[in-house]
Image: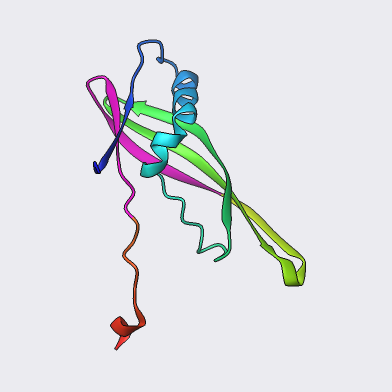
Amino acid sequence: MSSEIKIEILATETSIEDLIGCFQNQLGILADAMDFDVANFDERAQIDQVQIRNAEVDGDSISLTYELRFSAYYGCSELNYAGHHQRTLLGRRDGGFWIFPQQLPLPSRSTLEEF
């Protein structure tokens, strides 16, 4: 598996709105570069929606702002929890592609490591 995510740049995608639409349409591919960890908000939280909100291009660099909407349900207590959080994804242009680093999961810890 590659450690980089490549999204092809089409010649027609020149405006910020076009780029945002392109990345939103490519979320299936781009997802491997995005941070979806919301456990620090609620350990039961699940991602409900991902929305690309903005793109800033500076030469061959790009900064994508995306919003995660998440929720958790606690059935025994009849409680619902929902929230949203904005994050940033940085990438670069290489020829006809936008390149983003793959998001690698943190290594799992064992209680045996705490001794």
Relative horizontal placement of residue 61, taking residue 84 as reference (left or right): left
Any magenta on residue 114? no
Residue beneath the point at 29% across and 89% down = 115
Residue beneath the point at 51% across and 62% down = 39
Relative horizontal placement of residue 90, taking residue 20 as reference (left or right): left
Percent x, y for residue 32? 37, 43
Where residue 107 sits, quadrant-wise, is bottom left
Which coloring applies here?
Answer: rainbow
Percent x, y for residue 66? 49, 39
Where residue 81 sits, quadrant-wise, is bottom right
- Please state the total of marks drawn on the protein image: 0
Main secondary structure of the magenta stretch: strand
Residue beneath the point at 58% across and 59% down = 45
Which quadrant would the N terminus be assigned to in this image?
top left
Percent x, y for residue 36? 46, 51
Relative horizontal placement of residue 25, taking residue 60 as reference (left or right): right
- The residue stretch that appears in magenta: 85-104
Which of these two is toward me, 64 or 35?
A: 35
8 is higher (above) or lower (below) than 86: above
> Most extreme residue toward the right, as rendered?
78
Any magenta on residue 98? yes
Residue beneath the point at 36% across and 82% down = 111
> Most extreme residue toward the front, as rendered?
1
Which of these two is toward me, 87 or 25?
A: 25
> Most extreme residue toward the top, as rendered?
12
Percent x, y for residue 99? 28, 32
